[in-house]
Amino acid sequence: MPLDAVALSQALDEPLTLHSTLCRREAAAFQKAVRKPDELVVACTQERRLFSELSAQTEGAVPLDVRPIRFVNIRETGGWAREAQAATPKIAALLAAAHLPDPDPVPTVTYQSQGRLLIMGTLEAAERVAALVADVLDVTVLSTGGAGSQERRHPVLAGTVRQLTGWLGAFTLLRETSNPIDLDLCTRCNACVAACPEDAIGLDYQVDMARCQGHRACVAQCEVAGAIHFGRAPVTHTDTFDLVLDLRPSPAFTQHAPPQGYWHIQPGADPAALMAVVVELRGAVGEFEKPKFFEYKASICAHGRNGKVGCNACVDVCSASAITGDVKRQQIQVNPHLCVGCGTCTTVCPTGALSYAYPRTPDQGRKLHTLLSTYAKAGGQQAALLFHSQEAGAALLNELGRAAALVPPRQQPSGPVARIASLWRGQQAEADDGSLRGLPARVIPVPLWHTASVGLEMWLSALAHGASQVWVLMTGAEAPQYRSAVRAQMDVAQAILTGLGYSGQHLRLLEVRDARDLAELDAALAAPAAQGVAKPASFAIQSGKRTTLELALDHLVQQAPGRLQTQAATEGHTIALPAAAPLGSVVVNADACTLCLSCVSACPASALQDNPERPQLRFIEKNCVQCGLCVKTCPENALTLQPRLWVSEQRSRARIINEAQPYACVRCSKPFGTLKGIEAMLGKLGGHPMFRGDALERLKMCGDCRVVDIYSAPNETRITDL
């Protein structure tokens, strides 16, 4: 790698000493460093295990639980690329980000497994797997047919699966038994099998009712055991298990991300896949923890109000079926045991009621700011952030870097590097011809737990802080709805940037499934830079989604190309946005609206407001999240949503979107409603027998005068008299 120690020292504001063989001949330098209490970053992920063991074996080393070692890869992501000579700013940025303190720990979710395993499938297949795990797991088999061994080493259940719910350590099986043979009473003597003239009883000891002709010879043979009874009513059973292995053709869970503790293997699947599951099963006993990936603030949730469902984005996008709506409580319910931590729900949430916590948004924002500011300080320009998963995505980038190291012979350096490249080429001749470029010097990789966990506000903040582009790399392991959601959010962000006058494509979803598509990835990463801001922002990314989004928008508007910026500041400018946008306006049909103000009580973001002094409907566009609750609540169907970005100072101020002439009480002249509303009510109720004479006149009075008028009528029957 062509590393420039002087330039890196200047960018990081600390002296650096280069070690080219730190894990071998220069190990003493590492041992010296681990004895000091300072923060320690090792720019090598390949030898993570070796360095960790060396630290543990070094006398006087600071324990890893007191001062952990942070690892960062600068080789495949910077040093092994066609543009390695220009990658110093990126390498400095990666090293600076690695020096950041670890995010605060998040709450955890606990699972308890005692090893009670349910295997569902044919007896033969179930017994083969049971033999591999029975020494550590308590196995129960739910038979779906077949002929197993005569000796039953495990409990065998029968019946139709009605429902399977739960997760690791807490699965509940609901099954219904209606077969004439009760397996709990059956002694497996085979007398019924031999006696049945239609061969309707197999070695699974269940009667095939389609073949049974009703001779009942089996009942006579089973008289002593009493296991066969054709008049038995269906019985529902509930069983609990810690683990489930499903060997049936169709899985019990159809969502993209099944619960932890559940595995489905198709009959006839690759034996290697089955053995991998067996290994996981054998280790699935004990107590397990995972992060609680999300935080939920019900007070700003736009899911439901007044019995109406508005925003359902998180429920629709969740691939684990972990989110359900609760309209009665006007909020959603998230099951942390089912959540897999993809974070897509937080990406599509318009209000920020759901926020990602692994890491939290301010921690992620601090990292992005450090990467971009260090990159710029070191002289880097037109940075492109590449968000990728820390497992599959990182592996792809490593493969790309290694493939890019296979430079053509005319470009090979001499000495040890040439010998290493030659050896690598010999091992990988069929996989790569040395033509790949690797990660460009301006592309900064950003690993995430899941690539769908960042969205609109984070992308725009990164662009406001100086990034030229934001790319998201997906590897095919993601649920289809995740890719759709990310594309929809990218369309919104790109529409904003294009509408503000920034040229080029700023956001892109890269889909590469495995190393066979490295050439496609390599070509995509060579895309030209897009126009960025002239002056990077300095604001800190906040925990509130809407706050961060507004900060990013404000800076992007301020830095927008001059003509549009001047026009927007003086007369306002509107940018039409796609339907998925969490920004926009509400359009009122003034002819239909009666100013009942039911939309005001339904709005979760206080975008719609009333005026206590006059019959007015006011609107603050900055607050609107386009959830649609107002549209669904309006009894007159007078409201429609208009996704847009209004580039104007008026966007953050209340404006009147409808008002009406007040209706004055016919008795005291106090305004108590709108002229249109009272007239509409009189028109609908005027012909009703309950509103004849004085009763109709009272509808024209305010509430106080109506009560006084009722009690001043001497001959009128009142509700209190009945």
Image: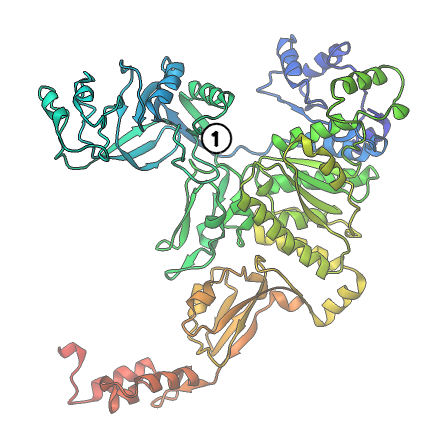
Q: Quadrant of the N terminus?
A: top right
Q: How many marks?
A: 1
Percent x, y of residue 616: 49, 77
Q: Which residue is mark 1?
A: 290
Classed neighbour count for the residue bearing mark 1: other residues with Cα under 10 Å, few (<14), some (14–19), many (≥20): some
Between 86 and 282, the residue placed more toward the observer is: 282
Residue located at (35% from left, 31% from top): 170
Tag 1: amino acid = Lys
Residue located at (28% from left, 83% from top): 706
Q: Quadrant of residue 228?
A: top left
**Residue 99 visible in image:** no
Between 676 and 543, the residue placed more toward the observer is: 676
Residue positioned most to the front? 197
Q: Quadrant of residue 230?
A: top left
Residue 72 appears left or right of 146 = right
Percent x, y of residue 629: 46, 62
Tag 1 secondary structure: strand
Above or below — where is 422 with respect to 469?
Answer: above
Percent x, y of residue 269: 48, 26
